[in-house]
Amino acid sequence: DSVRRYTSDTGDGRACRWMELRLLQYALELWRHGSFTRAADALDIAQPSLSQQIARLENELGVTLFFRGHGGTQATPDGVRFLEQAEQIVRLHDDLVREMRERSEGMGQELVIGAPAITGGHVLPPLLRAFGERHPTVRVRLVEDATEVLQDLTARGLTDLCVLALPVEDDRLATRPMLTEELFLAGPREVAHWMDDRVRRVCLAGEMPVAPVDLADFAQAPFIMLKRGFGFRGTVLALCAESGFAPRVTYETSSVETAQSLVAHGLGVTMVPAMVRRTAAPGPGAVYLPLVGQPRRTLVFAYRRDRYLSAAARALLDMYAQRGG
C-alpha cells in the first residue's frame, strides 16, 4: 500500500523525496482521532511507532503538521492544508484499487452504509435481507450516528451509501430518492398541567380529530427535540418558524423513541415521521395528530459524487429501485 520513494530536484538545488502512501494514511488517522493513542489503536500499531512515523513525515515536508498537547492532537494550519489534499490522494488510490479489483474479481466483500439509528432500523432491514439473499458473500457494516456526522463521513468517502433526509446541503454528495412520508405531532393522551383548553381538547379527542391541527396552536407547549446535529431537529424548527413561533424546548434527546416516551408521560409534545409512530396501547401514551398542510420529509440515499461507487452499492440501489422503494 505504498508508492515508490523517489528523489527529484525542486528547482533551487534542494532534493525532495515523496513520502509513502502509508504515511498519509497514518496522518489522516491521527487527524480523525485527535490522539496518538486512539489513532495507533485504530491502525493496530504501537503508539511510539506512530509518533516516529509522523515526525518522519513532518521532517520530510519541513513543516509541523500537528500541535501536540495534553488536551489532544490538532492539525496546524499547514497540517490542515496537507491533510485535505492527502485525503483526496488516499481516496483516489483506494477508489482505483477497488475498481480494478472489482473488474478482475467481481463484487467486493464489504458494503458500508450510514443511517440514523431509528430511521435505519425502519427502512433498511427488509432491503438488507433481500440484498443478503442475493449477495451472501458481501458483509454489510452499518454506521449509526447523528445526521451531521454521517453527512461528513459520506462526504469524506468513509461510507459507501448513507440514508439522509432532504435537504442535503453538501455539494460533494449526490442523492437518489428513497421515500417520502408524512410528519405528525405527538402529544399526551392524558391531561398535562401545561395544556390550555384548545390543546387539551385536541389531545383528548383521540387518534382521529375532525380535521388536521394547526401547529401554531401548540406554540406555548413544551417541545421535546432531538439534539443539535440531527437533521430532523432542523426540519421541526423550520416548520415551527413557518407557523410563526420558536418552540420552547424543555427536553433534548438523541432518540426519537425517548422523545415519544417523554411525550407519553405528559412532559411535552414532539414531532415524528410516520414510520416511527408507536402503536396505541392501554395506559399513558401518545396521540399522533396530522397537521395542517400535511408536512412531509423525503429520505434519500447519499453518496460521494466524484467517488467510485462500488458494485455492491450499485446493486443495493438497483434492488431498492426494482422493489419500488
Image: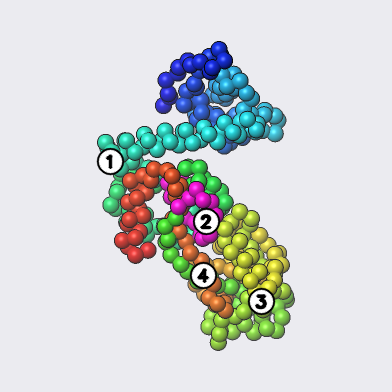
**Amino acid type at mark 1:** Gly
- Measure how far apart labels 4 and 3 are at the Cα level: 17 Å
Residue 15: percent from left, percent from top: 53, 14
Q: Say which of marks 4 and 2 sits in front.
A: 2
**Residue beneath disc 1:** 106
- Pointer 4 or 1: first along the chain: 1
**Amino acid type at mark 2:** Val
Crowding at label 3, few (<14), some or many (≥20) Cα neighbours within 10 Å?
some
Crowding at label 4, few (<14), some or many (≥20) Cα neighbours within 10 Å?
few
Camera sees residue 320:
yes
Residue 299: percent from left, percent from top: 47, 61
- Measure how far apart labels 4 and 1 are at the Cα level: 39 Å
**Residue beneath disc 3:** 216
**Amino acid type at mark 3:** Ala
**Residue beneath disc 2:** 168
Q: Give the magenta-colored segment's residue range.
A: 159-174
Residue 296: give its label.
4
Q: Say which of marks 1 and 2 sits in front.
A: 2
Q: Say which of marks 2 and 3 sits in front.
A: 2
